[in-house]
Image: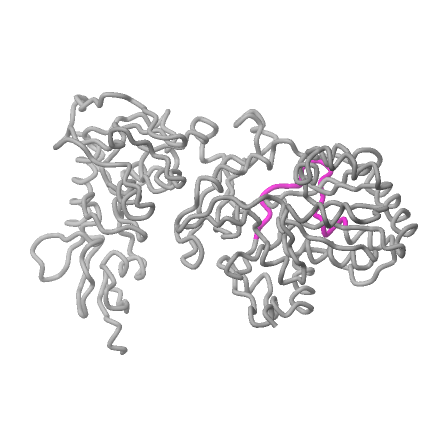
Amino acid sequence: MSTDLIQLNIDGKHVEVPKGTTVIQAAHKAGSEVPFYCYHPGLSIAGNCRICLVEIEGVPKLQIACNTPATDGMVVYTQNAKVRKARQDVLEFLLVNHPLDCPVCDQAGECWLQDYYMQHGQYQARMDENKVKKTKKATHIGKEVMLDQERCILCSRCVRFCDEITGTGELGIFNRGDHSEINVYPGKLLESGYSGNVVDICPVGALTDKDFRFQTRVWYLASTDSVCPGCSRGCNIQVHTKKDVDRHAFKAQGRRVIRLKPRTNPLVNRWWICDEGRYGYRFVDEGRLSALKQGTWAENLQQLAERIKEVKNKGSIVGLLSPGQTNENLFAMKKLFEGASAKTLCVSHTAAGEGDNLLKTPDKNPNRAGAEALGLTVIATNQLQGALCNRDIELLWVCGQDIARILGEELFSELRKRMRWMVYQGSNQNVTSAAADQVLPSTVYVENQGSFTNVDGRVQRLWQALRPLGEARPDWHTAADLAARLELKGFEWQSEEMIFENLAEKVPFFSGMSYEALGTGGLLGKTAALSS
């Protein structure tokens, strides 16, 4: 056995763990369920909820598993009668002043107090209703978060998050005994830019999300793994959507995406996401391009194919790509533009924004690294004028960019008058789409399979959470259909996975990768290949 490993026995099961492992971590590795509220792997140990009590052979009193180091030869019991009785007592204590408002609490369905009570609770209540009433039922403590002090069990996770992760220290625990309560410090609000995380880590319904409150019940939601498109960090997320969109169309004002939650990836975002990414999902259901301007897809693609053939070899086609597109869509569209002899440009779809030392990057393009790995040079928005205005353009094909916003509407209007035909391929309405001769509606990231490459060169998968809205299609699908009409070879894909296999064969940065190999955590690209 390695000297860095120790062995212990938990509920009759031998388990080997590294030195420094706590009993609760060892128990979870052994498959023994130990309940907890205040423990969180990303925060310091508080040891104040006491529900993780376990019995350790040779130790007279029960010990908290979250703050007890595992030692070699230790024998631990997590499920015996003594331990279960202690958990019942802890739950009884926590519920003394907790309101029984589960029917109206937003945490219903994902409340750890409910869950653990059903597993370990004291079913014969011994208390008459005479609870300590807090001053206010629900208060605003920031732009995104509501606080209901009566539901708080003082686990202090939110306080430690503000102290240890953001370093902003907005929250504290005030007063003593059963009058203790959590609150923001006088003159402060919870506005660190990461406030939604305190809602995620609150195990009961004390901290709730204003954006989600009363929109729907969690048991109506489906969850799909994805990657945040808000910046180049590529934080791992879960997309929560309505399970039955048609049946529950009346909920959440008809939105299909209800909320985003962080997905743990220690190599990218650990357990957190920023508020900017968390609440930046409304474009999925609002202002969408869901229909062709006129005609059918077949008619539009035939018309476009004929126009491309007319001007193909005159050097007057410009294709404009975006580092907001997935690797698969970029690969397909770049290949199509090359086949059509188009001048291909890739321009940042948004100006640089704010970054920080935690997760946010100033680059708001989710796939700049992927575009560069594919051989595209991403130009800044202020370079677009020079790239377009000094060129004789017969056909401009814009993918996902509002160039009217980038150039300014006056300059865009002049440019528009000089070109014979303009195609807009994108997901949302804007001035550019309104001025285009043809509009080809695209899917958004939650309607696609695909992948993004983040700022560190990590290629990460997206899974499809929703069916495409209306007539919207993935960009690669449009590219493949049009390529067939132009009699171009090498576009015989049937899925995003087939494109990625093709891409991994052709582009050294993606060499050896597949959707299966990417898994849920992603893989680093071959940066040596990129630099060479």
Residue sitting at x 68%, y 52%: 346
In magenta stretch: residue 467: yes
Q: In this view, does 159 lie above or below 270?
A: above
Counting from the top left corner in percent of width and height, residue 211 is at 45, 30
278 in the magenta segment: no
Q: In this view, does 188 lie above or below 49?
A: above
Image quadrant in which you'd find residue 70: bottom left
- Above or below: residue 257 compared with residue 103: below
Direction from residue 25 to residue 240 in the image, left or right = right
What residue span does the magenta drawing correspond to? 462-478
Asked whether 285 or 416 is in front, the reply is 416
- Describe residue 230's horizontal placement relative to residue 207 as left or right: right
Which sits in the foreground, 250 or 284?
A: 284
- Kindly indicate the quadrant of the structure image that contains residue 184: top left
Q: How many marks?
A: 0
* Quadrant assignment, res 492: bottom right
Residue 35 percent location from the top left of the image: 27, 47
Q: Residue at x 45, y 56 (%)?
A: 268
Which residue is at the front of the view, 331 or 151? Answer: 331
Q: Where is residue 78 in the image (x, y as percent from the top left)?
A: 22, 54
Q: Which of 403 and 459 is in front in this view?
A: 403
User: The C terminus lies in which quarter of the figure?
Assistant: bottom right
Q: Main secondary structure of the magenta part?
A: loop
- The residue most toward the right is 310
